[in-house]
Amino acid sequence: MSKTAKMLSVIFAGLFLLAGCTTTTSSQTNNDDQSPADYTIELSSFKFSPNLIEANPGQTIKVRLSNLSGEHDFVIDELNVRSELLGAGDSQTIEIKIPEAASGKIYEFYCAVSNHRAMGMVGTLRIK
Ligand SMILES: [Cu+2]
């Protein structure tokens, strides 16, 4: 009985140590403005709505692409972002990792289908 109690107390001590480590680690990696930003962008012929989104350097943003009509995709060459080819009614959520050194940068996103980019199907990802 007392052996069991001793083992339990060792286990609990271990759990407290683990909890301590976890807390320390997360407080080191938590910067002020790291909460994930979520955007929904609607795609149609031939535009993105909204066509301007913003993010912080080092942030990973989740963007939901909702295609209303026609066939479209979402591409940012500099960040190696390319969605699937979306048909009418399709949607996909993509993650965009913003580089730490991207402060003040402007990235263009566009639709790579046919001549949509030339038709004005472009938008801006602005890094604060
Ligand atoms: Cu398109």
Image (cartoon, helix red, strand yellow):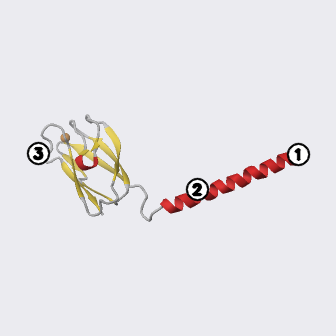
Q: How crowded is mark 2: few (under 14 residues within 10 Å), some or many (20 or more)?
A: few
* Residue 80 higher or lower than 56, as above or below: above
Percent of width and height locating residue 44: 21, 42
Q: Could you tell whether 120 is left or right of 14 in the image? A: left
Along the line of sight, the residue nearer the viewer: 117 or 20: 20
Q: Could you tell whether 118 is left or right of 48 in the image? A: left
Along the line of sight, the residue nearer the viewer: 88 or 119: 119
Secondary structure at badge 2 equals: helix
Residue, x 78% and y 52% (percent of image)?
A: 9
Residue, x 23% and y 53% (percent of image)?
A: 51
Percent of width and height locating residue 45: 17, 42
* Cβ atoms under marks 1 and 2 closer than 8 Å: no
Residue, x 14% and y 48% (percent of image)?
A: 120
Percent of width and height locating residue 47: 19, 47
The quadrant of the picture showing ligand 1 is: top left
Q: Could you tell whether 23 is left or right of 97 in the image? A: right
Quadrant in which residue 24 is drawn? bottom right
Tag shown at residue 118: 3
Tag shown at residue 97: none
For marks 2 and 3, the one nearer the N-term is 2
Q: Mark 2 points at which residue?
A: 22
| Amino acid found under the numbered disc labelled 3 | Ala
Q: Name the residue under label 1.
A: 1
Along the line of sight, the residue nearer the viewer: 23 or 49: 23
| Amino acid found under the numbered disc labelled 1 | Met
Secondary structure at badge 1 equals: loop
Residue, x 70% and y 52% (percent of image)?
A: 14
Q: How far apart are marks 2 and 3 (CA)?
A: 50 Å
